[in-house]
Amino acid sequence: MTSMSTEDVGKDTAGRMYTTMTLAAACDERLRRGIGRGEFAAVIWPHRGQEAIAAGMGAALRADDRLVTTYRGLHDLIGKGVPLIEVIGEVLGRTAGASGGKGGTMHITAPEVGVLLSTGIVGAGVPVGVGQALAARQQGSDRVVAVSFGDGATNTGSFHEGMNLAATWRLPVVFVCQNNLFAEMTPIAETMRVERVADRALGYAMPGERVDGNDPEAVHAAVGRAAERGRSGGGPTLLECVTFRFEGHYSGDPQKYMPPEQLAAARKADPIPRYRQVLLDGGVLTDAELTAIEADASARVEEALRAVLDSPVPDLGEIDRDVYAAMEGIPA
Ligand SMILES: Cc1ncc(C[n+]2csc(CCOP(=O)(O)OP(=O)(O)O)c2C)c(N)n1
Ligand SMILES: [Mg+2]
């Protein structure tokens, strides 16, 4: 695994990554608090603990690159640049949401920043991302597609079919596995014989790399290299970003299946204070600058939440709009 801070990302990128991490964590924590105390009704699949992956990936991708993510992808969306109000609006089912409040947490799309699909169907994003990469090639664009999914998703047929096709056609895809060591309530060792998800790339003659998913700079470097490979015709890459899920599978999950020592050790190694210390020690950002980023994150989440709560739920007349495309002779 790559150790912390192996590349000099510069102050701007470091600041952007720390901003993504703190914003995503503040968003996750605020939503769970609101759900827990009955302030609003919603369900989220908490990403707390996995923010370094979203930060590194988001900063390594170009604005026109595409991202496909999952139900546990609010951090990925924030890292790619989906405005907070659109993320929170969608979670709370309000018209301010990215999908007009009709998609919910699982189905957030924001095509203007390259997000055409988030999905609740495990593994289903993989072939759709591969299709988007084929479209990029056919359109003569050098954009790449990052597909983010969990360790459990790598046991699905759609993952293997998508990997095979992407490798065979040398498509510009970066497969980003967020290995949080659990799929719902099941530890990874009970569902796969391989010890390293990255080794699954071997079956498709594709580079596979295991990365410290709690180090944003390591993720940034790995996604950057993989994106460059894809852009220059070198084909896809599988990245296994090893991390940990601090909360239950869904908001409210009592997590009884989680060994307490494992959870305590992971929380103690929280990637956010860890990266803060790296930035301080390296003289990249000052304590005052880091504190300002943290305060700003909380304020921005609170401001977005207020705006969302002031926005209406979708009108009943909206229910079948955007479901089917309007085509000549066929009413939408
Ligand atoms: C095709 C399919 N099978 C099963 C489920 C139920 N399910 C939802 S999340 C999940 C676990 C997925 O684990 P992983 O891919 O590791 O992602 P994580 O939730 O850890 O981010 C399962 C089995 C589903 N949503 N879709
Ligand atoms: Mg998992």
Image (spheres, grey):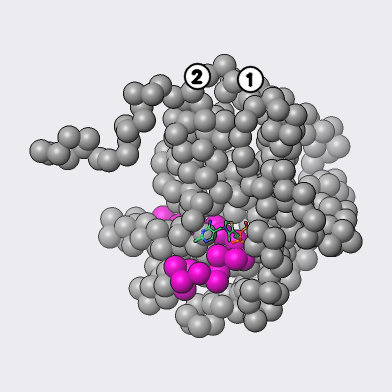
Circle 2 Cα neighbour tier, 10 Å, few/some/many (<14 / 14–19 / ≥20): few
Pointers 1 and 2 in contact (C-beta within 8 Å): no
The answer to whether residue 14 of the structure is visible from this angle is no
Residue type indicated by callout 1: Arg
Q: CA distance from mark 1 to mark 2?
A: 12 Å
Element marked by disc 2: loop
- The quarter of the image holding the C terminus is top left
Query: In the rendered structure, which segment of residues is drawn in magenta?
Result: 142-160
Q: Which residue is drawn at the image coordinates 28% and 55% (left, top)?
A: 139
Query: Which residue bears the numbered disc 1?
Result: 306
Element marked by disc 1: helix
Place of residue 299 in the rendered image (x, y in percent of width and height, measured from the top left): 72, 25
Q: Which residue is drawn at the image coordinates 60% and 50% (left, top)?
A: 72
- Magenta segment: does it hold 156? yes
Task: Tell me which corner region of the image, top left, top right, bottom left or bottom right, holds residue 165.
Answer: bottom left
- Which sits in the foreground, 121 or 15? 121
Mark 2 and ligand 1: say if the CB distance to the nearest ligand atom is below 8 Å. no
Circle 1 Cα neighbour tier, 10 Å, few/some/many (<14 / 14–19 / ≥20): few
Task: Tell me which corner region of the image, top left, top right, bottom left or bottom right, holds residue 290.
Answer: top right
Q: Residue furthest top?
A: 310
- The quarter of the image holding the N terminus is bottom right
